[in-house]
Image: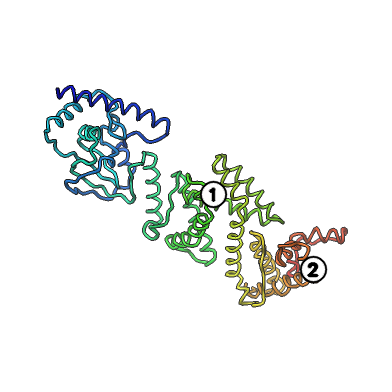
Amino acid sequence: MYDSLASEAFERAYRRSFWRKVFARLTGQTNELLPYDEVRQALPFQSQRDIGLQSVPLDKIVGSVGRYRDFDRAFLPIQRQTSQRWVNIRKAHYQDISLPPVDLYKIGDVYFVKDGNHRISVARERNQTDIDAFVTEIDIPFQLTPDMDIDAVQVEKAHARFLQETGLGEFHPHVDMRLTNPAEYERLHEHINAHRYYLGTERQADVPYREAVNSWCENVYKPLVEAIDAQGLSKQFPSFTLADLYLRVSEYQWLLREAAQQADVEDEAHEEATERMAEIYQQRLVRRVIRTLRHATWLDEMIRDKEYSAFLDKTRIVELRPEAHILASLPGKYEKILEHIDVHHYYLGIEQQRDVPYPEAVASWYDNVYMPLVQLIREQDLISRFPGRTETDAYIWLIDHRELLEEEHNPAAEHEDAPDSSET
């Protein structure tokens, strides 16, 4: 009698595994046990220890050392070769025979079967919720969860390695930097290295790597991620992580700044940046992100605010000329002004035959280049013809179009290759 009941139970479990396989294919859900050896090799191992006899939830047992091809994710049997062992264990339950605890490895929040696969399978078929087990816990620097497949484990591995290499796991443990594509962590490394380079250039000194990492996280990554979250992009594109969106938005931001330096109007810069992003990314979802950014006025404001802050820090114009009111309405324009100052600085040094301190060059540019043009702009009331633009916008436009304007005014005029300090 017990043999018959146990065999029927196996057949029910086997049929259930078949239909679970069908539904998994239709829905794309994970239905395979995780192979312990493969997972173990993928993880940065720290230590392990025996934690003794535990009552373990069955739904957290998601992998096996040697039998991961014999059962599905619910530990239902998917082959008949070992059916007799399964039947014998089920028969022992009918006969109220006590079975020994199973042996498990615990990694993160999940468990792998070292010994006792059939006992766990029978327990799942009997709708048990827990099973007694001797547990060995393996420490890793991140969490594995029951819903993960082997690809997700590889993603977590890459994330953990990135946190270890940068030290971000120690100094910023609550900042989410998970990427869906492990290969893209190299791009985050590139962002950090670029930030380190610019910090060193600004300070005229080598910047320690960990200091650069911390500065990048605090001053680049977190502000942009907070803006992305505040604008609801993470809800619009739930299949992307915040770090995924950071990479796309920061790249678009960089292209927009590049384009804005040459564009006269905001739409031209966005159009060029959008076209260049579309050349890089062919994925439909990324292109949806790009279309969203195309109309994102907050991105322009963020770029302008950051550039303005950097402009004030570099020039100290407010200290040198407290009355100065230099405000551009388009992104990318403060870098143009800094280029003007650098050219003026260069020719001023030639003219005076000495090394001119940068603050002196900034003040001279403001007094002898910027303000004379602004006075002309005011006399001609140019701003009234361009609503929404500023005197600084008009100054930049006049400088950028100076040669064309001179040709229209005097087509026969000869132009020198290099302007003197008053023509910057």
Q: Using the image, determine if residue 10 lies above or below residue 185.
A: above
Residue position for label 1: 248
**Cβ atoms under marks 2 and 1 closer than 8 Å:** no
Does label 2 or label 1 sit earlier along the sequence? 1
- Display colour scheme: rainbow
Q: Using the image, determine if residue 243 lies above or below residue 364.
A: above
Q: Relative to the observer, which residue lies in front, 385 or 360?
A: 385
Q: Secondary structure at mark 1?
A: helix
Q: Quadrant of residue 281?
A: top right
The N terminus lies in which quarter of the figure? top left
- Circle 1 packing at 10 Å, graded few (<14), some (14-19), many (20+), is some
Q: Quadrant of residue 262?
A: bottom right
- Residue 146 as seen in the image, left or right of residue 6: right
Question: Residue 392, labelled with which disc?
Answer: none
The C terminus lies in which quarter of the figure? bottom right
Position of residue 184 measured from the top left corner of the image (x, y, whole percent): 47, 46
- Residue 309 as seen in the image, left or right of residue 148: right
Position of residue 148 measured from the top left corner of the image (x, y, whole percent): 36, 41
Three-letter amino acid code of the residue under disc 2: Asp
Position of residue 152 measured from the top left corner of the image (x, y, whole percent): 39, 42
Q: Relative to the observer, which residue lies in front, 86 or 135?
A: 86
Measuring 72% from the left and 67% from the top, which residue is drawn there?
391
Measuring 64% from the left and 63% from the top, which residue is drawn there?
334
Q: Secondary structure at mark 2?
A: loop
Position of residue 225 measured from the top left corner of the image (x, y, whole percent): 49, 56
Question: Residue 381, labelled with which disc?
Answer: 2
Mark 2 vs mark 1, CA separation in Å: 41 Å
Q: Using the image, determine if residue 219 lies above or below residue 370.
A: above
Is residue 296 visible to us here? yes
- Circle 2 packing at 10 Å, graded few (<14), some (14-19), many (20+), is few
Is residue 196 visible to us here? no
Q: Using the image, determine if residue 55 lies above or below residue 377.
A: above
